[in-house]
Image: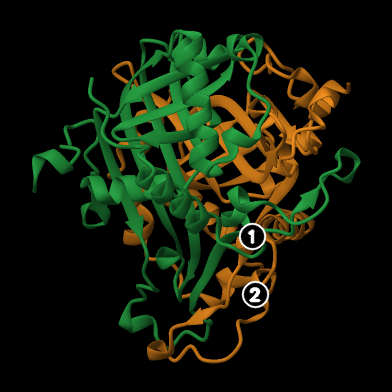
Chain colours: A orange, B green
Amino acid sequence: MDQTTAYAPTDRARVRRRPQRAHYDEATVHAVLDAGVMAHVGYVLDGQPYVTPTAYWREGRRLYWHGSAMSRMLDAVDGAPVCVTVSFLDGFIVGRSGFVHSLNYRSVMAFGRARRVEGIAERRAALDRFIDRLYAGRPLKLRPATDEEVAATAMVVMDIEEASAKIRQTGVADLPADTGWAAWCGVFPVETRIGAALPEPAMGAGGAPTLDLAPYREGARLDEALAQAARSAQARGQGAPVST
Amino acid sequence: MDQTTAYAPTDRARVRRRPQRAHYDEATVHAVLDAGVMAHVGYVLDGQPYVTPTAYWREGRRLYWHGSAMSRMLDAVDGAPVCVTVSFLDGFIVGRSGFVHSLNYRSVMAFGRARRVEGIAERRAALDRFIDRLYAGRPLKLRPATDEEVAATAMVVMDIEEASAKIRQTGVADLPADTGWAAWCGVFPVETRIGAALPEPAMGAGGAPTLDLAPYREGARLDEALAQAARSAQARGQGAPVST
């Protein structure tokens, strides 16, 4: 495996259970990360673990997330070891024995140390990149952020030191001996999609969503829309490996 | 607030940011928990936080999850403080300034100490309850689990000591002064639904899914299907408050 495009697993990130479902290559890890917008950030405060769901984005081998300057989570993770997990439920597996019932899923656990992004200009630029990653070109349409708004926004960045993806995308693993049991068996796929857009008419926002919002058309799969938006952002020069 | 039906928040569980979005009553917390099947379990191992996605279910004020007897996660959480987080992404909020862009979501953070469920009979019964919570009556259709299968399955239970729900289900909070900016504004709802069932024909599993699988019909919202299955399980006597 090319070390330059893999997250070398150490004991922390190595998948122990079902290693055949594990992936450490950058392409697989990034594909899972780029298909999502909500991560679960794990951190420790006085020995107590916390898991906070939060919006995130990826640039190269870095993950960013943000929140209020008053956020306990953003305070706690600054300089601390963090685990950022992104997961998708893709299906229910039902078989002829309880043991083979399972779920299809994609997930990534990414490990590193988070640190605050200091500086109003740096945070303003990163916030614009986040909007632009989701909605290509939208920052140019928006009322620019005030210094007060940026000051009220804390942001952290984490270099991904290690990461592993775990993926199960299969059918039923029934035992041949169980074929005679008269229970239906198969898979119920699970899909997350965009619903019908809800414009804010009181704000003069009639009409169809503009081009920057095109990936989020009604019926689009959310993971595909986000992955497509990420590819588009990378083609515009975002998300290239960042020199450190 | 009735103490018997609320998760009294202490410093650990109290929502600091946007307290108007916080809920501690049992009905709200349980409604979020019962609408999901994948939780993110946070735990600490040698000072390092881990967040593992895993299937879970609720009975009264208890959460259960399970996995391989070889699981690092199930070893690490036994007797240890744990944070179990369940979240749903419900929509994208797009406004006229970067600052008001946001997500609609529902989430619960539940805190407690996990402990292993010992005993083959106890684990077998709990696994049947999990199958039955998802697929009413299905345990009776299945080849019963062998002792070896149950022995290979580790399980933990966590009494929820504290919990908080955080919910944002609103529209755009644009500033009146920003109305003039010509950017579309509104909400893109996000919905997770069941796709078309994939039977395993090689296993003689043709035909429509049986009645135990009825909640997972094509097009059903997953959160509603799981909530309905949970109500049905509770009506059958599952999930009543368990005496300790």
Q: According to the image, label 2 marks what residue?
A: A218
- State the image coordinates of residue B55 (x, y, percent, origin top left): 54, 33
> For this view, does A114 lie left or right of residue B110?
right
Q: Is residue B222 visible?
A: yes
Q: How many labels does the image show?
A: 2
Amino acid type assigned to the residue bearing label 2 in the image? Glu
Which quadrant of the figure has residue A129? Answer: bottom right
Disc number for residue A144: none
Q: Which residue shows up at 51% across the image and 38% down it? A: B132
- Which residue occupies the foreground of this view, A58 or A244? A58
User: What chain is tagged by disc 2?
Assistant: A
Q: Is residue A154 visible?
A: no
- State the image coordinates of residue B229 (x, y, percent, origin top left): 47, 50
B38 versus A134 height, above or below: above
Q: According to the image, label 1 marks what residue?
A: B217
Q: Which residue shows up at 79% across the image and 30% down it? A: A173
Q: Which residue shows up at 56% across the image and 44% down it? A: B135
B178 versus B239 height, above or below: below
Amino acid type assigned to the residue bearing label 1 in the image? Arg
- Which residue occupies the foreground of this view, A53 or A147? A53
- State the image coordinates of residue A86 (x, y, percent, origin top left): 59, 39
Name the secondary structure under disc 2. Answer: loop
User: What chain is tagged by disc 1?
Assistant: B
- Which residue occupies the foreground of this view, A238 or A178? A178
Q: Residues under labels 1 and 2: Cα distance?
A: 21 Å
B219 versus A154 height, above or below: below
> For this view, does B199 lie left or right of residue B176?
right
> For this view, does B145 lie left or right of residue A73?
right
The crowding category of the residue bearing disc 1, from other C-alpha atoms within 10 Å (few below 14, some 14 to 19, many at least 20), is some
Name the secondary structure under disc 1. Answer: loop
